[in-house]
Amino acid sequence: MHNLKKNSPIIFKDQKIFQAINQICNSKIKILFVVDKKNKLLGSISSGDIRRSIRKKVDLNQSVQNIMCKRPKYLFKKKKIETSKEYLISIPIVNMKKEIIDFQYSRVIKQKKSNSIFLLAGGKGSRLLPLTKKTPKPLLKIKGVPIIEKIILNFKKQGFKNFIISVNYLGHKIKNYLGSGNKLNVNITYIHEKKVLGTAGSLSLIDLKKAKFPIIVSNSDLISEIDYKNLLNYHRDKKSDLTICAKNKIFEMPYGEILQYHDQVKKINEKPSIYHLVNAGVYVVNKGLLKKLIRNKKLMMNELITDQLNKKKRVFSYPIYENWIDIGNKGDFYNYR
C-alpha cells in the first residue's frame, strides 16, 4: 500500500454516498477515486454522478460503489495535460497492480462569463421582522458581510461580473450600499419595482437588448456554493427553456411506516427518511421566455413554471449537492449569522 497525502481525492469503497458529497463540497477537485484498503483503483465518482443519483432519489447511505464509474481514467506516469476546463482536474497515477501511487493535477483556468445575473431583492422580508423593519433583508449581515454581497462575491469568484438587481422595499439602501458595483469590481444595474411584482414579475422589466442570455435568476436570501458555470452548461446541453435548481431535502417521519398488501402487514419501517427535491430558488432563463411576459404584471415563479409546462416548453431540474442555505426566517438567520 502506498501512502498518499491526506487531501488526496480518494474515497474507500465501503464509504457512503453522503460522505462523498461532503468530501467533494469541501474540495476544489470535483471528482473522487474509489479505492480498496491497498489503494487499488476501482472506480471514480464525479459531481455529475452525484447529481444523477440525487435525481433518481438514491439512498445516500448506500455505498459509493453503487454509483461509481467503473472505468476511470488513469496514467502510469505523469505527463503534461492540456485543458481548457475551468476547475481543477486530477488523474491518478497507478502502478502495474492499478494501485494509486500519486496524482497528476492540471492548472485551474478561470474564464469570465458575460451572462447576466438577476438578483431578486425587492421583498419585505416579513418572516425576519423586526430585523427587516429598517434594513432590507439582502443587507442583513452573515458573519459581518451583507447577504447580497456574499452572493455577488460568490458569482464573481466563478467569473461573473454583470448583475441586475430588482429592488422595491427599502431599495434605496441597497443602491446606496452597492452602488454601481465598482467597490466589488463588478457591474450592477437596478430595476425598481413601483409595486410588488412577486418572485417573477420583475423579469418583465429586464432590458432584453442589454442583458446577456441565458440569465441566472436567484433569490437574494440564499448562500450557496452552486457551480454556476456547470449549471449553464447543463441548461445548454439539455436545450432547456427554463432550468430550476433542486435541492435534495431529507425529511424524517416521526412514526413507523406500515407497508401492507390487501390489509396484511408485510413490513414496518421505523421512522423512515423521505427524500424530496425542493425548489432551491435559483433558475436559468432564456430570452424567448421573457419576451412573452406582460410588463409590470405581478407573477410568482411557480406560476411562470406552470405556464411553461402547460405550453410544453422544455423545463429541467438541476440537482445541487453543494452547500445551500436559505436565510429566509429567523431560525436559519441566527444559525448562520
Image (cartoon, rainbow, N blue to C red):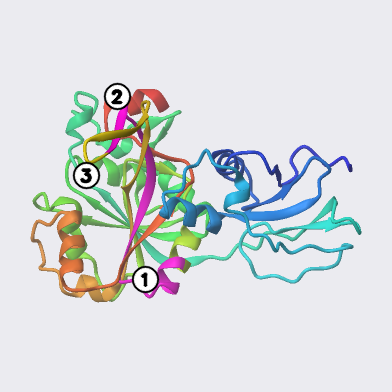
Question: Do tag 1 and tag 3 residues touch (Cβ < 8 Å)?
Answer: no
Which comes before the other along the chain, label 2 or label 1?
1
In this view, the mark in front (2 or 3): 2
Q: Residues within 10 Å of mark 1 (few under 14, many from 20)?
A: some
The residue depicted at 19 percent of the width and 52 percent of the height is 199
**x and y percentages locating residue 74 in the rendered image:** 78, 62
The residue indicated by pointer 1 is 212
Name the residue that disc number 2 marks.
255
Q: Is residue 199 left or right of residue 22?
A: left
The stretch in magenta equals: 234-260
Q: Quadrant of residue 123?
A: top left
Dot 3 amino acid type:
Gly
Residue 279, image x and y in percent? 30, 49
Residue 333 place in picture, x, y as percent: 34, 28
Q: Nearer the viewer, mark 1 or mark 3?
A: 1
Q: How many marks?
A: 3
Q: Earlier in the sequence, mark 1 or mark 3?
A: 3
- Judging depth in this view, the residue of 133 and 276 nearest the camera is 276
168 or 26, which is in the foreground? 26
Type of the residue with mark 2: Tyr
Residue in view at x 36 percent, y 70 percent? 214
Give the Cα separation between the discs numbered 1 and 3.
Answer: 24 Å
* Residue holding disc 3: 171
Report how far apart the C-alphas of labels 2 and 1 lie in the structure.
50 Å
The answer to whether any part of residue 316 appears in the image is: yes
CB contact under 8 Å: marks 2 and 3: no
Tell whether position 238 is magenta.
yes
Which dot, 2 or 1, sits closer to the camera? 2
Q: Residue at x 75, y 44 (%)?
A: 8
